[in-house]
Amino acid sequence: MRIRGVSIDLWFTLVYDDAERYRLFQRARIDYIYGVLKMYRDDVAREDLEGLFEEFKTFMMEVHPYRLMQMVAAALGVDSEAVDEMYSRYIDAAWNARPYVNSDALRFLEWCEEQGLPVVITTNTTYSREMIERMFSNIGLEKYSEKVVSSAEVGAAKPKPEIFRAAVNKLGLDPKEVLHVGDKYVHDALGAYLAGLRPALYRGLWDRYGRFMGFGEEFEVRSYPPYIWVVDSFEELIERLERLTR
């Protein structure tokens, strides 16, 4: 069956961060919410909020930010009336999110558009759709804001099948007609395959991800099953897709 649509990962596939830019958003997120909390309880310490985010980080990618603000308010004994304003400020923090755009991936999206292949961006993220819209406006990707499936919105992160089903449904295609490309072997390649999509593992930003997360040169070296396309550039992926149509 031919490929009729594409799902592409966001972080370290379409965009990438470095430690400084990542810290800027993390700091802004705490600052913005803390400013609201102090209006309701002046005895709340910033360290209390930071501790909650540390405790919540294991599931934040599967919880909508509004629900997260409800949890923060409840944990700190803050009136529920604060939640709407906390959420509004949490969204505003995304104006501080300015990752780099991967020009290699951007050229691939342009190629997909030229070929008439619809695209959805399928991402494990703590961001709601409104936050992604703000971030995309920061980095010139506004046209893709409506083409995002966020794990925080779906309530399921890759490699769970629910997020891939949401992406396929957004495209209106059969899973076997959709190619998913991302940088994580388990989350993207295996997750997509087990959800019925065609998987491609993109390694073009592994060096940047390794430095960002503190990994060494052995970041990920293994032998891959034959059903996974392993590519080091999107140009290579384009060539593979073009061969399918010849």
Image (spheres, rainbow, N blue to C red):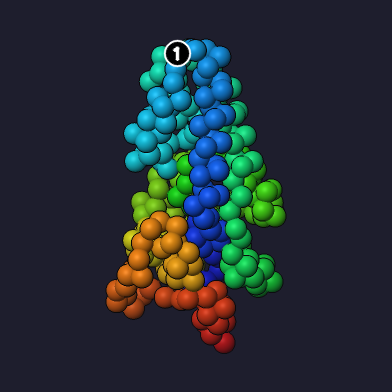
Coordinates of residue 231 in the picture (x, y in percent): 46, 76
Within-10-Å neighbours for mark 1: few <14, some 14–19, many 20+: few
Residue sitting at the far bottom: 246
User: Where is residue 111, by image quadrant?
Assistant: bottom right
Q: Mark 1 sits on what residue?
A: 43
Indicate left or right for 39 with 138 as reference. Answer: left
User: Which of the two residues, 3 or 20, is positioned nearer the viewer here?
Assistant: 20
User: In which quadrant of the rendered image does the C terminus lie?
Assistant: bottom right
Q: Is residue 42 above or below residue 220?
A: above
Is 78 on the left or on the right of 160, as rendered? right
Q: Count the marks.
A: 1
**Percent of width and height locating residue 199:** 42, 68
Of residue 12 and residue 215, the one placed in the foreground of this image is: 215
- Residue 95 drawn above or below residue 114: above
Q: Is residue 15 shown to the viewer in this render? A: yes
Q: Residue at x 49, y 12 (%)?
A: 42
Q: Position of residue 120 (x, y in %)?
A: 56, 57
Identify the residue at horizontal 49%, vertical 60% (top origin): 12
Q: Residue at x 51, y 44 (%)?
A: 23
- Choose between 165 and 156: the one closer to the eye: 156
Q: State the image quarter where residue 159 is shown.
A: bottom left
- Residue 70 x/y as whole percent: 45, 23
* Closer-to-camera residue (99/116): 99
Quick check: can you spot residue 193? no
Disc 1 element: loop
What amino acid is found at the position of numbered circle 1 in the picture?
Asp
Q: Which residue appears at 64% of the width and 70% of the height?
A: 107
